[in-house]
Amino acid sequence: MTKRVVLAYSGGLDTSVAVKWIQEEWGSEVVALAVDVGQEPNANAEYWEAIRERAFAAGAIEAKVVDAREEYGSRFVANAIKANALYEGKYPLVSSLSRPVITRHLVAAAREFNADAVAHGCTGKGNDQVRFEVSLRTLAPDLEVLAPVRVWGFTRADSIAYAERFGIPITASLDKPYSVDENIMGRAIECGAIEDPWNAPPEHIYERTRAVADAPADSVECVVAFERGIPVSLDGVPTPLHQMLPELDAMVGAYGFGRVDMVENRRVGIKSREIYECPGALALILAHADLESITLERDVMREKSRLETRYAETVYDGLWYSPLREAFDAFIDSTQKHVTGEVRLHLQPGQCTVVGRRAERGLYDFALATYEADDAFRHEDAAGFVRLWGLSVETWAKRQRIEEPTVRP
């Protein structure tokens, strides 16, 4: 068995128990690594110090916290926004995007602390085990990858009892059945009552969105500016993405926009009911896609739209570190050269809609589009164009089309 393990540590029940369990069952030293990707929007130094202390109390020989929020925003979230990435047309890759960031730092910590293995706290039926392990084997195939939760066979009650037995300080209890994963992109919620897809999600599970009935009565507008497809300012104030998302969460979420309730197809082959709240992320993807409508040439836009689905599937399936994702990003970056401009969003209860967009190098030509006196379109060219466009089907209709039988009353 390995001598030293770096564990992806969240400070929650499973990873806290994993620290002690790895020591007791496998006889390995454990280094706990917590990667800050914005899972606690209001977290301060005291919060992360408490996480470190919990890891030490569980038996870790070292506990390290890495602030990866800026890296996560600029190198991972930005790419997903440029791709308008929504898994199965709904989910903006909240957990999927954060795993390759955490993996990078797991490998770095393993090198720093001379570990010969890394570990995660994922179950055997989820997506995250795939994302962690495929990424780890791509970045550091020499490191052993351990998954104690897949081995120990604990129920939630067993894990709580194990923590109590060894005096591990935890906040979990049996009356809090929901599993929540969050970062600057949003929150992912599963388990508990929502495992039955017929049950309506209880209101108390939401934190970043307000119920529509409680939204402000007065509507507001905000303006997001983009440079080469990346959001760069909010209402005229330059704002890095990792700070813009929490600001938009508060602004847009107050109007009850940004909730996703879906049954999705997991990589392991099962369907899972998931609840997401991602007001800021969904607002930015909405705004970005709209700006593309006036900056991308027609056929480029159609081809990019076709690839966006595959991009989201690739990231969801744990293949961030793959030649396919790199090839997708190369294509997408080439489409974003002129996706620079502003989008105006209108917020009202339950809705976030685009009401205006402008781009200095946009392809919208007023003189071609208008029906007024300034019209510069050559109408005389239309008759020949339409005739040639329909020539193929016209020829088919004359030679091969079978007349449908007359429908009698």
Image: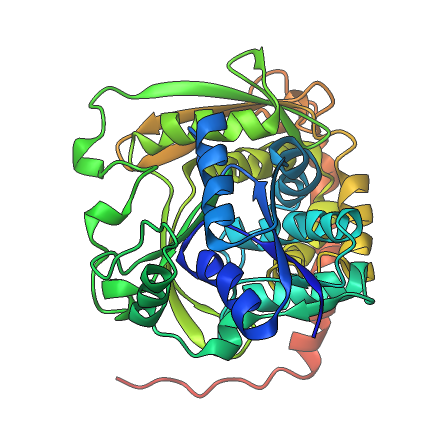
Q: Residue furthest top?
A: 236
Seen in the image, is 346 located left or right of residue 65?
left
**Coordinates of residue 336 in the picture (x, y in percent):** 75, 36
Q: Nearer the viewer, residue 150 or 166?
A: 166
Q: Nearer the viewer, residue 293 or 383?
A: 293
Does residue 193 lie above or below 36 as drawn? Answer: below
Could you tell me if residue 384 is visible in this image? no
Q: Nearer the viewer, residue 404 or 261?
A: 261
- Residue at image x 76%, y 63%? 116
**Coordinates of residue 255 in the picture (x, y in percent):** 29, 31
- Residue at image x 56%, y 67%? 22
Seen in the image, is 24 located left or right of residue 296?
left
Residue 350 falls in which quadrant of the image? Answer: top left
Seen in the image, is 149 located left or right of residue 350?
right
**Coordinates of residue 190 in the picture (x, y in percent):** 35, 60
Colour mode of the rendering = rainbow
Quadrant into which the C terminus falls: bottom left
Could you tell me if residue 35 is visible in this image? yes
**Coordinates of residue 185 in the picture (x, y in percent):** 51, 41
What is the tally of numbered marks visible in this picture?
Answer: 0
Q: Nearer the viewer, residue 136 or 2?
A: 2
Quadrant into which the N terminus falls: bottom right
- Residue at image x 79%, y 32%? 337
- Residue at image x 47%, y 54%? 58
